[in-house]
Amino acid sequence: MEKNCSFVCEVYHLKLFKHEFFDSVDEIKYQIGRFLWPTIFMIVGIIFCYIALVPEQLVLNNGEILHNQQSPFFLYGAIFFMLGSVIWYLYLFGIIRTMAGWVVLSLMCVFSAYLLYLDYAIIDEDVKYKARYETIDKDIIARMFDIKAAVVTKRFSINTTQ
């Protein structure tokens, strides 16, 4: 009987260990999932900040080095990503769960809408410029064909009159 009780106790402890093990794995998985997105936002913000602050160096055909720097709006977007990540961390740690948190969240929503509008305006301006460029380019090509046709017609009329 004593041997049977010890076996039951060992099985019970093994089941308890397995249960605790899977609970701890689930807890680790939960914590990783909880902090994954703010960490990704922070990493993206740091990468964008690096891209915004360090100018790209382009070497031209004549050997001259041209420093090409991003727009300041790109830096504002990077700061927005990092600020959003910090606020997200503060929310996860329970520091801002008050009215101040809702005020900060509202201000960030307004600021993000403003950044989206600026992004749209910049892209829309670029699209309009490219459309205008294509229209002018087609007009120039059509005028060149008209000039060529006029020259050919004039040569043909000079040759036929002689």
Image: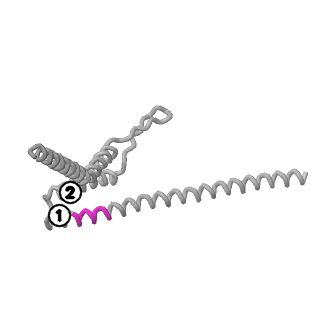
Span colored in magenta: 105-113
Q: Name the residue under label 1.
A: 101
Q: Is residue 57 above or below residue 35?
A: above
Rendered location of residue 102, percent (x, y): 19, 66
In the image, what residue type sits under mark 1? Gly
Judging depth in this view, the residue of 115 and 42 nearest the camera is 42
- In the image, is residue 63 part of the stretch drawn in magenta? no
Relative horizontal placement of residue 119, taking residue 148 as reference (left or right): left
For the residues labelled 2 and 1, say whether their Cβ atoms are less than 8 Å apart.
yes
In the image, what residue type sits under mark 2? Ile
Q: If you read the primary sequence from the N terminus, does the residue marked by circle 2 or circle 1 appear first? A: 2
Residue drawn at (41%, 58%) of the image: 122
Q: Is residue 112 above or below residue 58?
A: below
* Majority SS type along the magenta span: helix
> Dot 2: what SS?
helix
Q: Name the residue under label 2.
A: 87
Q: In this view, does 49 lie above or below 100?
A: above
